[in-house]
Image: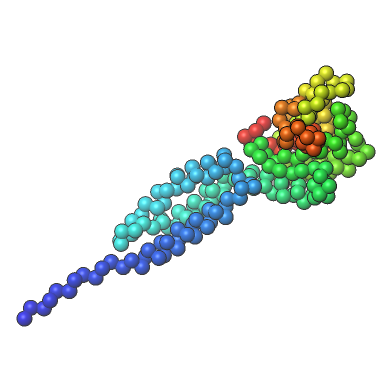
């Protein structure tokens, strides 16, 4: 009597669990790389481009039909991402923001300074009512000298001393009642005076630019006194690489 032929064993699917674990770990790895406070759109595009270049690392088929990473390519991928200049600069700018928040914690708590970030870079906002009288560009140096000294020392920190900076003056929408013809001249004069004091305290003024925006870029509505107070400000920006 002929023996029955055994059906061939079905291919093992055990590899799927390992493969799934690897994909999950890679996802976690890239999530940890991403910090919204440190990475901007340009950096993400460069990281994405680097990952696209490395996709051939996933092209080695396994005997069971899956795909595996070519030996050594995962390490190469990580090295490529970490070696991107923009990533290193982004990390530096993120650390600088954290340091600024720490250094100026008392001033932030007393609402004399705010530290934030946007597409331009790190923004250090000086409350105009503390630094200037309303309608004036003369710094209230007796009350703000120590703050300006701290700012000048911060701008000489190793992480940011070689970056570019911009000082932007802003006003509310009230008509100027001083020596300045309009809020345009007032906003520029405030920015220039801040630069002069920072330069006196040791910063390299060649790395700075100034701009005045009058009342064209309010933070809040000018319909209230509180909103106007917030809009009367000077912003000092540690510029990201895409903004000069």
Q: Is residue 206 visible?
A: no
Q: Residue at x 57, y 55 (%)?
A: 32
Task: Answer with left or right where residue 219 lies relative to residue 51.
Answer: right
Q: Is residue 187 above or below residue 4?
A: above
Q: Residue at x 37, y 52 (%)?
A: 59
Q: Residue at x 88, y 43 (%)?
A: 146
Task: Answer with left or right where residue 31 lies relative to residue 63.
Answer: right
Q: Is residue 130 above or below residue 66?
A: above
Pick whichever, 20 or 223, lies toward us: 223
Render colour scheme: rainbow
Q: Is residue 129 visible?
A: yes
Q: Is residue 223 above or below residue 2?
A: above
Quadrant of the rendering where the C terminus is positioned:
top right
Q: Position of residue 195 (x, y in %)?
A: 81, 32
Q: Position of residue 199 (x, y in %)?
A: 83, 33
Q: Residue at x 87, y 28 (%)?
A: 136
Of all residues shown, which one is farthest toward the bottom? Answer: 1
Pick whichever, 95 or 20, lies toward us: 20
Tally the marks: 0
Residue 174 lies in what quarter of the image?
top right
Of all residues shown, which one is farthest toward the top? Answer: 181
Of all residues shown, which one is farthest toward the right? Answer: 142
Task: Answer with left or right where residue 36 lies relative to residue 232.
Answer: left
Quadrant of the rendering where the N terminus is positioned:
bottom left
């Amino acid at each position: 009597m002929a023996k029955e032929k055994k059906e061939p064993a079905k291919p093992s699917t055990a590899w799927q669990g390992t493969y799934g674990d690897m994909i999950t770990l890679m996802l976690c790895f890239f999530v940890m790389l991403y910090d919204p406070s440190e990475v901007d759109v340009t950096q993400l595009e460069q990281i994405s481009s680097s990952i696209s270049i490395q996709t051939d690392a996933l092209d080695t088929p396994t005997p069971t039909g899956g795909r595996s990473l070519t030996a050594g390519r995962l390490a190469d991928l990580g090295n490529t991402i970490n070696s991107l200049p923009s990533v290193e600069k982004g990390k530096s700018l993120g650390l600088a923001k954290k340091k600024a928040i720490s250094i100026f914690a008392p001033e932030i708590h007393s609402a004399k300074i705010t530290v934030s970030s946007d597409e331009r870079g790190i923004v250090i906002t000086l409350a105009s009512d503390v630094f200037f009288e309303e309608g004036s560009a003369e710094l209230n140096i007796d009350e703000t000298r120590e703050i300006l000294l701290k700012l000048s020392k911060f701008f000489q920190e190793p992480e940011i001393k070689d970056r570019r900076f911009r000082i932007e003056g802003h006003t509310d929408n009230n008509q100027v009642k001083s020596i300045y013809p309009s809020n345009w001249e007032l906003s520029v004069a405030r920015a220039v005076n801040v630069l002069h004091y920072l330069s006196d305290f040791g910063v390299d003024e060649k790395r700075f630019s100034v701009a005045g925006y009058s009342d064209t870029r309010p933070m809040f509505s000018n319909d209230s006194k509180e909103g106007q107070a917030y809009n009367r400000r000077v912003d000092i920006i540690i510029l990201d690489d895409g903004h000069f």
